[in-house]
Amino acid sequence: MPEAGELLLQLSQVSKYFGGVRALHEVDLELHRGEVVALVGDNGAGKSTLIKVISGVEHPDSGTIQVRGESVRLETPRAAQSAGIHTVHQDLSLCDNLDAVRNLFLGQEITGGLLRGRPVSRHRMEVEARQVLDSLAVKLRSLTTPVGGLSGGQRQGIAICRALISDPSLVLLDEPTAALGVTQRAEVLDLILRLKAQDRGVLVISHDLKDVQEVADRVVVMRLGSKVAEFGRGDYSSSDLIAAITGAHEAPRTPEGIR
């Protein structure tokens, strides 16, 4: 594997309970700059809860979170964004009646001068929208088309580009290829690799093991709220992942070992 970049995110012994239900148990996780890490596991494995903890939606009951080596408390999604962490949820949270530019800048519109009453600067937003869309090679016929009329791949691209408006160092993607066709899935996987090429850290939740093997530098396997295995690129097979996910037998150790 290539030499790891700056350590962006480190979770140590993170646990989360909902009443008497253990959702996460002493989970350790690291993510470096310029790295794609996939988080896999069956339903109820704890993947979504872990993403919510990192994105500031849920708060861990124990354990620590460090961003660039400093301990942080991600009390809210806004706090996570301020720490350079942006999450693209599975539902994308796009407004179908608005065009790409308005969706990209929704809630963070660029405005003019105070003397003019701070009107929204459509021109400046279009220029920046085109720049960020071009940076990930997201192709749109028109910036004025409502996003409800775009393909699934284009909509996913807009949702990811919206995350880049705030220039995050870490992007979390929740099932980015779910319900997409072959062509659209390939477009989204290319977007993930482009995020990596921009030297960002990418954490991907996915049920599609083929997608995982194509783009992930490391794969972290969750089961029943615990991290049960971790594999580096080229050090595992599909059967190894399935065995770890289902608990059919102990996942085989890689040259680096299971961490």
Image: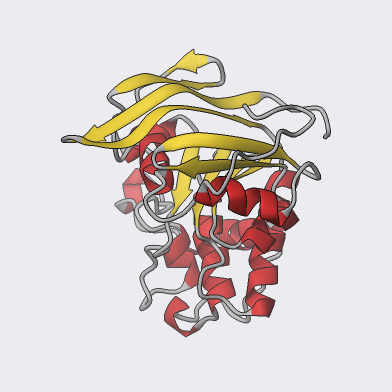
**Residue 167 position (above or below residue 64):** below
| Residue 40 in view in this figure | no
| Residue 99 in view in this figure | yes
Residue lying at the far left of the rendered structure: 19
**Residue 227 position (above or below residue 248):** above
Image quarter (top left, top right, bottom left or bottom right) of the N terminus = top right
Residue 235 on image: x %, y %: 78, 41
Image quarter (top left, top right, bottom left or bottom right) of the C terminus = top right
- Residue 64's image quarter? top left
Write the residue at 16% across / 35% down. Answer: 19
The color scheme shown is: secondary structure
Q: Nearer the viewer, residue 144 or 168?
A: 168
**Residue 24 position (above or below residue 42):** above
- Residue 109's image quarter? bottom left
Q: Nearer the viewer, residue 212 or 156?
A: 212
Q: Nearer the viewer, residue 22 or 116?
A: 22
Residue 161 on image: x %, y %: 56, 57
Write the residue at 53% across / 36% down. Answer: 228
In the shown orientation, is residue 208 left or right of residue 121? right
In the shown orientation, is residue 221 left or right of residue 112? right
**Residue 60 position (above or below residue 168):** above
Write the residue at 49% across / 42% down. Answer: 222
Residue lying at the far top of the rendered structure: 70
Residue 48 on image: x %, y %: 39, 48
In the shown orientation, is residue 100 left or right of residue 224? right
Residue 246 on image: x %, y %: 51, 51
Write the residue at 71% across / 64% down. Answer: 137
Residue lying at the far bottom of the rendered structure: 149
